[in-house]
Structure formats: C-alpha cells, structure tokens
Amino acid sequence: MSKHKYFELDEFIASPTAKKKGIDNTPSFEVVEHLDELVEKILDPLRAAYGMPISISSGYRCPALNKAVGGVSNSVHQLGYAADLQVGGSFGKFKDFVVEWFKKTGTHFDQVLLEKNAKTGAQWIHIGLKNNLGQQRGQIKIMEV
C-alpha cells in the first residue's frame, strides 16, 4: 500500500474474527491497489476535511472472513473497494458531515450506507468506491441490519 497521510494497510486487514478463527486475511496485490485507490480518492480527503480521527472497523475481507462475519456474498469488501468507518465522538455529527462532504465535493463513489445494528445499537458508515461491475452509482442509504 502506498504511503497515505491518515491510513495504513494494517487497519484494513485487521480482524478479531479472522484472528479468532485462524483465517488468513492477507490481500492480493490487486486488492491492495483497490485499497490504495479507496484511501487516495475518498478516505484521506474525508479525514483531512473532518479534522478528527476516523477508525476502520471493517476493511478488506477475504471470502472466508466475509462469510464468517455474515457479509453478503457479493460484498465489495472482498475486492478492497469498501471500508466501514466509526469515530470516537458524536456519530450523528460524523454521519451528517460525511453526507454533506460527498454532496459538497462531488467526489465519485458507489455507496454510502449509514448502518445501524438493530440488536446492539452499533453504528457505522460503509463507504464503497466501486461496485462489483466497477460502477459508481452515488447511492446514499440508511440501513438497519
């Protein structure tokens, strides 16, 4: 992974589930290139504009890890085109900031999913650069999982 200002490759491949289950979540060179593109085009500029730390709660997932965490079979996490984000401060403010940032900057993307776990109340933002067909549909959705 190229040198980026705010994010490191380890943040995208670290997974407690992979560690617990003995899953090798090492990305291919192609996936690393996709992660580079995601960071360069979206995550570093977003973090610079936000001005506070942003955590990657889920980045790259090999197919075995994707299955283990209950990801959809065609998840772009498996291609390195998506990351789930969290922050230490107000999630509501972060969520609003992200939506406005995409609208204001005109940055191309596939999906911004504002997600909440109905059982635990955990919240995160899924940002996808491209879908499985390489498209950037510009979808913003609120989802409860």
Image (cartoon, grey):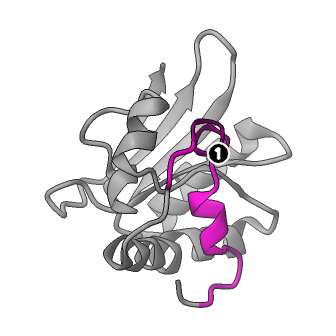
Q: In x, y percent, where is residue 131?
A: 24, 54
Q: Residue at x 31, y 55 (%)?
A: 110
Residue sitting at the far bottom: 3
**Label 1 crowd (10 A; few <14 / some 14-19 / many >=20):** few
What is the secondary structure assignment of the residue under circle 1?
Answer: helix
Comparing 137 with 10, the one in front is 10
Residue 44 lies in what quarter of the image? bottom right
Residue that extends furthest to the left in the rendered view of this protein: 133
Tell whether position 7 is magenta: yes
Question: On the rendered structure, is 51 left or right of 129?
Answer: right
Q: Please state if 55 lies on the left or on the right of 61 as rendered.
A: right
Q: Which residues are magenta?
A: 3-24
| Residue position for label 1 | 19
- The residue lying at 32 percent from left, 60 percent from top is 79
- Relative placement, left or right, of 66 versus 75 is right
Point out the residue furthest to the top here.
Answer: 119
The image shows residue 62, relative to residue 105, as above or below, that is above
Q: Amino acid at mark 1?
A: Lys
Residue 134 pos. (x, y %):
18, 64
Residue that appears at 63% across and 47% down: 15
Q: Residue at x 25, y 60 (%)?
A: 136
Up-down: is 124 above or below 101? above
Q: Total of numbered circles in the picture?
A: 1
Quadrant of residue 14 in the image?
bottom right
| x and y percentages locating residue 89 in the rendered image | 85, 45
x, y percent for residue 64: 39, 41
| 5 within the magenta span | yes
Residue that sits furthest to the front in the current view: 22
Image position of 34 with respect to 99: above or below: below
